[in-house]
Image (cartoon, rainbow, N blue to C red):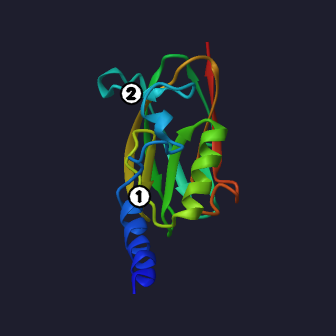
Amino acid sequence: MLKYVIPLLLFVTLPALADGGHAMPGHAMDAMHSRSPAGQPGDPARVSRTIEILMDDTMRFTPDQISVKAGETVRFFVRNVGKIPHEMVIGSLEELQAHAAAMRDMPGMQHSEPNTITLQPGQRGGLVWQFGQADTVDFACLIPGHMEAGMRGKVTVAP
């Protein structure tokens, strides 16, 4: 009897963890909760400009190329104009790829990180981010298959 209970407990527990976000220690996106080469959560009182980003079912962001200055705090006004859910996650390409792999392993994973916004069809929302040093920062939709289909973009951070 016990051999059937343990797999059932794992089956019940794993989806519950997925619905709770990414607060698990050691998660690939833990680095994004604080300073990283991609930047850090921005202070809404220090936003220098707002950039509108559209997400659609052609698996594209519009625009998909953005330029900012090192240290600049930007508010992204994000709209899902598609008929399926999409998200925008800011990070390094390596972080995004690791997170995308985790999402494939845990379908239905919910997000609560400051570098992420997930929107249902027709929804809109905001994300405030302060960019760090001069570099290139990536963003992507990490819903399984979306990034692989081309739903990604780049932020050029100038000195």
- Mark toward the viewer: 1 or 2: 1
Q: Residues within 10 Å of mark 1 (few under 14, many from 20)?
A: some
Location of residue 63 (image quadrant): top right
Of residues 65 and 106, the one nearer the viewer is 106
Please give the name of the residue rendered at 48% of the width and 64% of the height, measured from the top-left corner.
85
Residue that protrudes farthest toward the top in the picture: 159
Disc 1 residue type (three-letter) = Gln
**Image height of 62 relative to 39, above or below:** below
Judged left or right of residue 59, residue 2 is: left
Residue that protrudes farthest toward the front in the picture: 2
Q: Position of residue 151 (x, y in %)?
A: 64, 53
Please give the name of the residue rendered at 60% of the width and 54% of the height, measured from the top-left corner.
100
Residue that protrudes farthest toward the bottom in the picture: 1
Gap between marks 1 and 2 measured at Cα: 21 Å
Q: Position of residue 35 (x, y in %)?
A: 47, 24
User: Which quadrant is home to the C terminus?
Assistant: top right
**Image height of 38 relative to 52, above or below:** above
Q: Position of residue 20 (x, y in %)?
A: 35, 57
Disc 2 residue type (three-letter) = Gly
Q: Which comes before the other along the chain, label 1 or label 2?
A: 2
User: Which quadrant is home to the N terminus?
Assistant: bottom left
Q: Which residue is tagged 2?
A: 42
Marks 1 and 2 in Cβ contact (< 8 Å): no
Of residues 74 and 21, the one nearer the viewer is 21
Q: Which residue is tagged 1?
A: 110
Mark drawn on residue 26: none
Residue that protrudes farthest toward the left in the picture: 45
